Image: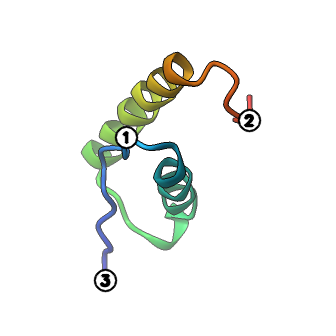
Amino acid sequence: MTTKIQVEPPTNLADFGRWLNEWGNSEEHTFTRKEREAYEKAISDAYDHFDRLYPNWPHET
């Protein structure tokens, strides 16, 4: 059974962490290539967004 994960990242920092964790556990889920590409773009856009809003927010590099 495939579990759908929200592709678009949330706009608040607390939910963003949970969203990253859900995607980080993606080995439990099956994704299409298109879903994975959408995730990769969304994650890049989300990091850019939070970098602009919170220049010192804690994230791994």
Front in this rendered view, residue 21 or 16: 16
Amino acid type indicated by mark 3: Met
Earlier residue among tags 1 and 3:
3
Amino acid type indicated by mark 2: Glu
Q: In this view, does 4 lie above or below 59?
A: below
Earlier residue among tags 2 and 1:
1
CB under 8 Å between callouts 1 and 3?
no
Quadrant (top left, top right, bottom left, bottom right) of the C terminus: top right
- Across and down, in percent, residue 37 comes to 34, 37
Residue matched to label 3: 1
Count of labels in the image: 3
Q: Nearer the viewer, mark 2 or mark 1?
A: 1
The alpha-carbon separation of the residues under discs 2 and 1 comes to: 19 Å
Residue matched to label 2: 60
Residue matched to label 1: 11
The alpha-carbon separation of the residues under discs 2 and 3 comes to: 31 Å
Look at 29% across and 54% down and name the residue there. 32
Q: Is residue 57 above or below residue 28?
A: above
- Across and down, in percent, residue 1 comes to 31, 83
Q: Residues within 10 Å of mark 2 (few under 14, many from 20)?
A: few
Earlier residue among tags 2 and 3:
3
